[in-house]
Image: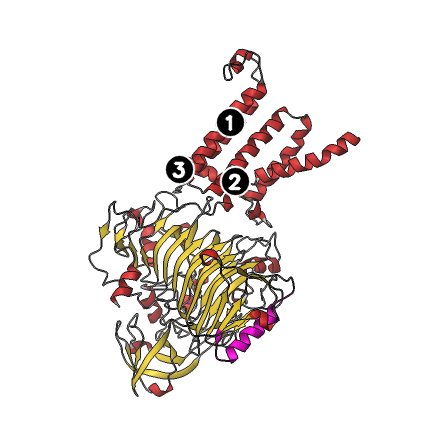
Amino acid sequence: MTGTLALLPAFFALAALFYWLGAQIYCKDFLLLAGTYHYRIRLAQCVTYVATAVALFFVIGFNVLTNKAVAGTFTGAAAYSPWIDLCVFCIIAYLGSFAFEWTLAKINWQNRVLTASVRLAEVALLCVVQYGSRETIYILPFVVAGLYMRNSKFGVVHGKDFFIACHMHDRRVKAPFPSTTGGKRFRIASTAALPDFANAGMRTRFGENLKRFNVCDFGAVPDSCDDQTAAVQKAIDTVGESGGGIVFFPKGRYHFRTGFLQINHSNIILEGETGAGKKPLAELVLCHNLVSGKRNPWLSPFLVTTGEALQRSNIFFGLQFRKRKETFTQSTSPSDPGSDGNILTPEFATTVIETSKKGETVLHVEDSSKLSKYIMLGLYNTSDEGNLLKDILGLDVFRMEWQTALRAGPERAPSYQWLVEVKRVIDKHNVELTQPLWRDCDMLYEPAIFNVPMLENVGIRNLKFNSTWNGLFRHHGHRRYYTVAQTQEMDYGWNAVNMKRVANGFIDNVTFNNFTNPLYVMDSRNISATRLEFGGYDGHQGIKVYEHACDNLFQDITFRSHYADMMGGEGNAYGNVFSRVKYVNPVFKPVDYDFHGFSEGPMSPPSHNLFELVSGFALIHCGGSNHMHPSFAQNNVWWNCSAEGEMRKAFIFRTRYEKKQYTPKDQCRLFRNSYFYGLQGAYNKKLLDPEYILGESWGTPIVPESLYSLQKSQS
């Protein structure tokens, strides 16, 4: 009895190791063996699995190898020694697996050590199972438990911590536009027909002359387990009330256990201390769930939320229907409590008195003296058929399930809502904008102008954001397995930064780890988000441009985590640029570009956005609930993007209409005037109807490398 008890620690240690090993196997990876999917390190993973299977085969085979001569041929030994033969076979399998994974996946040296450790552990455990005591058979269920955890669709607490492959962060990703001078290129004749994205990003630099304020002088204590919310908020408010400055975080971890941080003043920068190579050394840690689920939980607060005094959380902002009918909308998601359609509305300023054409910068108004610096130009549907929305979408009819689109005409929706900056007042009836009109400002649509108060010159740089979230995530939960509260938490409870109601701002050199929603840019314009990294647990929405997010730039972005809605927009989001974005994807977990439709009833889907030099994304996902479709409007551009994770010969759009007998041409009609230039992937080009889908040079990089840089240089 004493001997058995003494073996219990060893048994439990072995069981835990088996559980961990089972958690390394992702069943979907076996689909790669057939070459069904386009995945650049497919061969490396296939070799790994095959080599491991070979090792297992030989270990089991030694049970039936009783012919000493046959067994001895592998070692040259005169006497039969199963341990020697086993080691020979396992070393061959191990070296084959490790060498191929090392070479083909091009992993760095740290990950080679991890890979070597996993393979050696596999070999050692196989030896224990084969030549150990019979009691080891009771450990096998732990392998099954690990397999379930790795492949569960229902979410697992701290699950990703077990997955060795998810720590292969430095996998080299093929650039969409090769840096070498060789190779075939296609030079486009002219970009004049494409939307002009030169106005994306910060308009003016700021911060050089701002005074620095140390949060420790306001009572904040780095590396303390105490709540730092009050002290840091006091620092932010004091700096804001004094006219602005830099709120500086020295090296250390700052825990936030209550509430959230608000920036309600202009000219404020949150800045952290940096080390070698500008690596952020200050870390802001969210320690509690922020979800607010009674209304619009998708608009819950974030750890850092700007413009809260202008636009509180949990409510949309924008123009309302002119003939609004009381209605209640709700999706099928368990986390959706439904919406009554109430929104915050801006102050009416003046009407437009004369048509202005696309490309012009002057608006003709009734009284320019009533305009503020930032305005919202609204155009309204003026027919029961929804004439404006049909023009925006390029469609002649709306499907029956598109309930939001069907409301646009009868309720006179302001389907076009553009947040823009006034450059100068010319005279009483004319104002000049900072950029050209995206479309005609036609008197047919009864255009009106509204004033929009904004914060200016807000920045965040050199910081790490982290959370104590346990990583339990399944997209929109599951009614059978999770309560509404649990579902809302995993969808909307752990949020990092919401850049809301800001004009001219930046987020630079920032890392986000373990958030379900790391970054929103909402009702803001001219934000530059650069040098960002996303890691840790997988979550809901990676980068989202929301509502009236216009002319924002997202550049040099690295995703090391998977998000259900990876990167994209919702609502009247125009002129946003996503440039030099890569998804590392060390395991086979494809992601898509994401579009989510209208946001709220009076609005319309995103249009005139640019995705360039993006690598690792598979398809274009038309997301959101059916009543908020179509997911995006016209004139979105993909330029020199490189796909990964799509099925070979796939249709580029991932929609819900495939099950409704919609042909590829029907689907192309939904997303007409989408532009694809230099797109590289395993798509079936023949399914794209050139009458609706525009572009050139499929499969070959196009010159110039960056459309945004070209247009910026010409502006």
Is 220 within the magenta?
Answer: no
Q: Residue furthest front?
A: 276
Residue 268: percent from left, percent from top:
48, 73
Is 242 within the magenta?
Answer: yes
- Amino acid under label 1? Ile
Residue 255: percent from left, percent from top:
60, 63
* Residue at x 75%, y 33% (from the top left corner): 6
- Please say if 641 is above or below 379: above
**Residue pointed to by mark 2:** 114
- Please say if 157 is above or below 304: above
SS state under label 2: helix
Q: Earlier in the sequence, mark 3 or mark 2?
A: 3
Give the Cα separation between the discs numbered 2 and 1: 17 Å
* Residue at x 48%, y 80% (from the top left corner): 243
Give the Cα separation between the discs numbered 3 and 2: 26 Å
Residue 377: percent from left, percent from top:
36, 76
Is residue 341 visible to us here? no
**Residue pointed to by mark 1:** 91
Query: Left or right: 298 with respect to 359?
Result: right
Give the Cα separation between the discs numbered 3 and 1: 28 Å
Q: Nearer the viewer, residue 179 or 542?
A: 179
- Amino acid under label 2? Leu
Query: Left or right: 184 with respect to 154?
Result: left
**Residue pointed to by mark 3:** 35
Residue 162 position by quadrant: top right
Tell me if label 3 and label 2 are in contact, CB under 8 Å: no
- Amino acid under label 3? Gly
Residue 287 position by quadrant: bottom right
* First to last magenta residue range: 225-245
Total marks in image = 3
